[in-house]
Amino acid sequence: MTTFLLFVLSVFSSSMSQYWQKRAAMLFAMQPDLRPLQKLFSRPLILSVFFLGVGAMTWLGVLSVWDVSMAYPLLSINFVIMLLLSHYVFNEPISVRQWIGITLIMLGVIFLAGGEQWLI
């Protein structure tokens, strides 16, 4: 169960890192005159790097227990999270093709994880 919680934290951290990268990109686009050091020490970029580090450390904990051949495909949950975040937070449209893709990804995750004792 502890490894599963590490996995959830890793997925959450990875998604949050992507969220803050998008925020940083938006900030840089809105303020093109920012100097490189201002960009480097901007709140969104710092938070992105922080969550990236947390995600990497928790991912190492997951890999110390789970086989990478099973664990890595489960990270595709990040695609689902980010698509939904982009829609609800950044007001990006989701096409029918993307909904079909999300459905296929989730079916793949369920198929991979279904009945496996290592998730528990």
Image (tube, rainbow, N blue to C red):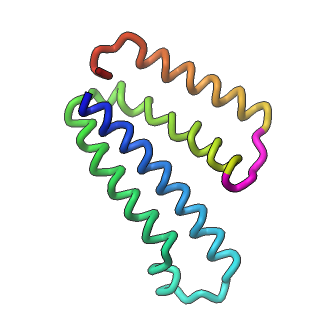
Vertical placement of 35 versus 114: above or below? below
| Front residue (pair 44, 56) | 44
Quarter-of-image position of residue 72: top left
Q: Position of residue 28 (x, y in %)?
A: 63, 76
Q: Is residue 87 left or right of residue 35?
A: right
Q: Count up the numbered dots.
A: 0
Instruction: Give the answer, above or below, for where 38 lies relative to 79.
Output: below
Instruction: Give the percent coordinates (x, y) of residue 95.
Output: 79, 37
Q: Position of residue 2 (x, y in %)?
A: 24, 33
**Quadrant housing the N terminus:** top left
The reply, left or right, for residue 38 in relation to residue 65 is right
State the residue at coordinates (34%, 27%). 69
The residue depicted at 50 percent of the width and 78 percent of the height is: 42
Which residue occupies the extreme left position in the image?
64
Quadrant hosting residue 52? bottom left
Q: Is residue 64 magenta?
A: no
**Main secondary structure along the magenta-highlighted residues:** loop
User: Which segment did they paint magenta?
Assistant: 89-94
Image height check: is 23 above or below 100?
Answer: below
Question: Which of the 4 image quadrants contains residue 98?
Answer: top right
User: Looking at the image, which residue is at 52% across and 55% down?
Assistant: 18
Quadrant where the C terminus sits is top left
Q: Is residue 72 above or below residue 116?
A: below
